[in-house]
Image (cartoon, rainbow, N blue to C red):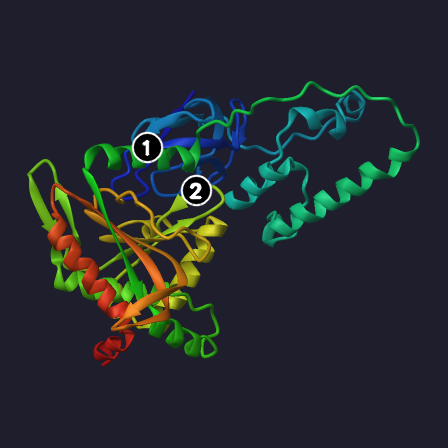
Amino acid sequence: MVRYEFKLPDIGEGLHEAEIVRWFVHEGEKVTIDQPIAEIQTDKATVEISTPVAGKIIALAGPEGEVVKVGEPLIIVDMQEKMEAVAPVAPQEAAEQPTSSELAPHRKKHVIAAPSVRKRAREMGILIEEVKGTGEGGRVVVADLERYATERAAAAVAPALEVIEPTVSPPKQTEERLPMRGLRKKIAEKMVKSAYTAPHVTGMDEVDVTTLVDIRTSLMNQLSIKLTYLPFVIKAVTRALKEHPLFNATLDEETNEIVLKKEYHIGIATATKEGLVVPVIRHADQKSIRELAEELAELTGKAHCHTLRVDELQGSTFTITSTGAKGGWFATPIINYPEVAILGVHAIKRKPVVIGEEIVIRDMMGISLTFDHRVIDGEPAGRFMAAVASVLEKPEQLLLDVR
């Protein structure tokens, strides 16, 4: 026996361990080179892992939900067990061979499908091995799942009218338990580390964005994609970060040093069905409102389809989180550790405001700045918020950045 230990590789900067979300293979199964074997969850993303060798699997790292450290064996393969063609069966032996239908329960069909499609299949209660793929090379896509579900529902309804049996209602379920796995588990771990490592303080204010609302409305018809307020917020934040570099930093706890970042990579907290992810817009200070809007649309789409690359989730120097148009007026965001601050932007509401001696109706936005009190004090936090508010209240200032 020639044993090959395929160890969990370091697929991203700073990766130490990953959770096994789903196995695509089992012990005793023969695999080919580059065959997907598992779906794993890192601190940043869900990744599909393929085997670099062919042979027979003799051991797996553990059950789904197991955490494996980088450098530890993920699978062990007997490389002497090659994937060979099945020898022809002699005529007198053919009758003794089990049929394909008899073998079906014992064989696991290899299916080509993206991790997001496999997750969707689980959500729909579909065994993906039963679905015929129409994508390239027989790949199963979401449309195949929907077609399969429709056909299954139609087949179930057809004989339903023949006999009506009295049924006994099952006992009422009083609770349901959901395993804390995958992305949800990683979010929980990161939030706990941030909350219990950095002393959080949150400052709140409201900003008059009446002019910004008018400018965005006038620009919306000029772009082929949805224009939100976030590109303007990003521009306001990058200008404020240049004026207040202490906010574009991390704290190196081993050397007891504040590390000021000289580049401006803005993380955008994005809510997905599985949980919160933070795709990163790199060099945000060098991009126009149009470019930021286009990149936001692309990254948000990838986040919801679970197709973000690991490098698109790394390297942020400051994070912005938005509760959206239907969110609350204020919140207390948790810092995207090891960054030292995070800005929350909230709903825009029309409110009466005193300007001079008059009461007028204006479009007002709530903002919240949470900062690490080990690094930042209340007074500079107030000045940072004022710098952000200044640009949002008078967005025409952004014209000064146009080259």
Position of 347 compared to 159: left or right? left
x and y percentages locating residue 104 in the rendered image = 70, 28
Q: Distance between the residues labelled 1 and 2?
A: 13 Å
N-term mark: 1 or 2: 1
Residue 260 visible in the snapshot? no
Please give the residue where the numbered disc 1 appears in the rendered image: 189
Q: Residue at x 47, y 41 (%)?
A: 274
Q: Element under label 2?
A: loop
Mark 1 packing: few (<14 Cα in 10 Å), some, or many (20+)?
Answer: few
Which mark is drawn over residue 261?
Answer: none
Instruction: Determine whether 356 is above or below 66 in the image.
Output: below
Instruction: Determine whether 35 is above or below 400 in the image.
Output: above
Q: What residue type is labelled 2?
A: Gly
Q: Which residue is drawn at 48% across and 78% down?
A: 221
Position of 356 compared to 42: left or right? left
* Location of the C terminus (image quadrant): bottom left
Residue 241 visible in the snapshot? yes
Name the residue furthest bottom: 403
Please give the residue where the numbered disc 2 appears in the rendered image: 275
Q: Quadrant of residue 199?
A: top left
x and y percentages locating residue 68 in the rendered image = 35, 27
Position of 336 compared to 303: left or right? left
Q: In which quarter of the image is residue 255?
A: top left
- Of 8 and 366, nearer the camera is 366
Q: Element under label 1?
A: helix
Name the residue furthest right: 162
* Location of the N terminus (image quadrant): top left
Q: Residue at x 64, y 28 (%)?
A: 107
Q: Which amino acid does label 1 sit on?
A: Glu
x and y percentages locating residue 9 in the rendered image = 33, 36
Position of 166 compared to 86: left or right? right
x and y percentages locating residue 109 in the rendered image = 62, 34
